[in-house]
Image (cartoon, rainbow, N blue to C red):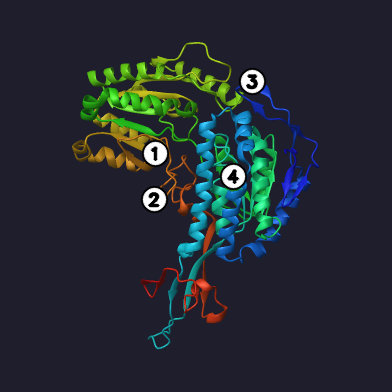
Amino acid sequence: MLTGKNYIGNSLSAKGTKMFKTFNPKENIENEQVFYEASTDEINQAVELAHQAFQNFQAIDSAQKSKFLKTIADEILNLGDVLVQLVIQETGLSPERIINERARTLWQLQMFADLLDEGSWVDATIDTAQMDRKPNPKPDLRKMLIPLGLVVVFGASNFPLAYSTAGGDTVSALAAGCPVIVKSHPMHAGVSELVASAIIKAAQKTEMPNGVFSNLNSSGIEVGIQLVKHPLVKAVSFTGSISGGRALFNLANQRPEPIPVFAEMGSINPVILLPLALKNKSREIAKTYAQSITLGSGQFCTNPGLILGIKSESLKTFAQHLSDEILSVEPSCMLNPVIADNFETNKEKMIQQENISTVVSFEKNVDKNYGRPLVLTVDGTTFLKNPQLHQEVFGPFSMLVQCESIDELETIISQLEGQLTGTLMAEEEELLKYVNLVQALQNRVGRLIFNGVPTGVEVCPAMQHGGPYPASTDSRFTAVGIHSIKRWLRPFSYQNWPNNLLPKALQNENPLKINRLVNNVFIK
């Protein structure tokens, strides 16, 4: 079923001379299929085709786009166990995790299809003319959101389905009316090709213009660089490292026409253990966080990589409980030898820092590419002085910071870089007692959690998945939920335009029956 070729719209292509293979981390062997990296000619063909497709795709009505998304979901489901087994071969993830992630991917497609069916996402705003207004007449003005154009999506290493080829970035861009070129992640190029085939089938079945979707292979950074620099590309999405996201952001802003890069990057997701909660529920919290730290071998952007508390007997007890619970969890396979090796290297860098000691280290022998959990601890003063300790270690890792006081804890939070999430393990009265601390945490994160874990990102309209830099490049937007569509849209106004020539969303009769703001009043 796999060809190793690139999808240039509806056509398979393998003109490049650079080839590569994916890797099975559980078996610790290369997979057999050879993939052809996209050549410069193929990149240009895909971009030109997408640019041409945009002229028609942006004008296709929401009902037809909704059908397209629903059909993508059907075609992915039709791939059946073949898809599940291929994800296992290329990532080492468990069947249960893959099936859950596939369900999330299908739900995202349905969610955006529903959004299109309802229609109010265009934010239609109408201010009717007042020709008798003094001293100057008021023109008729009507505004709505329209698509930006071609979007390039970089597949994520840690979510081969939900954040990759048919993931939230791709689906939200297609819903917005933007053609998409996916630069597939080299660690799961086969999965990307298989899912791409489902999208192409859906596009053909629903009569979408050829070029509305393409999938390009790459083994390194060259294909991505060419895509970001191409003048016909209008926006970029990326999920990955700070260095990778920042490099793309810089490239996009150096273009003659700068374009937005919506990058979700590093986050250590601070967790604050307030004294009363820690005293009352030390063992319970330790068990909960041992599971969260080790979940998926720690390969989540929301992994709790930093835990902070006030020095006390309760904190010592918590550390012992956490150690016991961590050791009771069997290590799991990491996504790729490169990720596993980087995890070991970054752990060692942390261990070598001054005034660091170990809470728990899993020392038993494990299979190759399995992540052995590590939790370190350090005092608050050392943590403040050493920025290296603030960096993400991608894998089953966390650092416990023991602060001398609430004031020191608040200072640490205020000096952290931007994060996706912040969590408070607390009793309700402690939220009122430590208002300044709560405020400081709110200023550094995109989502504030009370007595929970950051892992597990609910896909729903109220989810905010993004945060101050470097958690993301623009904290005003989310990468999850229906509002993620706003990344691929721009506001556009019509002035004194003939009613019958306006888009249906802005016509007087409101033929779409959507919610609109008319003369400062919401009306349907």
Alpha-carbon neighbours of circle 4 within 10 Å: few (<14), some, or many (≥20)?
some
- What numbered label is drawn on residue 28? 3
Identified at 68% across, 51% down, the residue is 201
Q: CA distance from mark 2 to mark 3?
A: 41 Å
Q: Is residue 153 above or below residue 232?
A: above
Alpha-carbon neighbours of circle 1 within 10 Å: few (<14), some, or many (≥20)?
many
Lower sequence index among marks 4 and 1: 4
Q: CA distance from mark 2 to mark 1?
A: 14 Å
Lower sequence index among marks 2 and 3: 3
- The amino acid marked with disc number 1 is Thr
Q: Judging from the image, what secondary structure is the residue with disc 4 in?
A: helix
Q: From the image, which quarter does the N terminus lie in? A: top right
- The amino acid marked with disc number 2 is Ala
All told, the count of numbered labels is: 4
Q: From the image, which quarter does the C terminus lie in? A: bottom left
Identified at 43% across, 15% down, the residue is 361
- Residue receiving disc 4: 77
Q: Position of residue 241 (x, y in %)?
A: 54, 35
**Residue 301 visible at all:** yes
Q: Judging from the image, what secondary structure is the residue with disc 1 in?
A: strand
- What numbered label is drawn on residue 421? 1
Lower sequence index among marks 2 and 4: 4
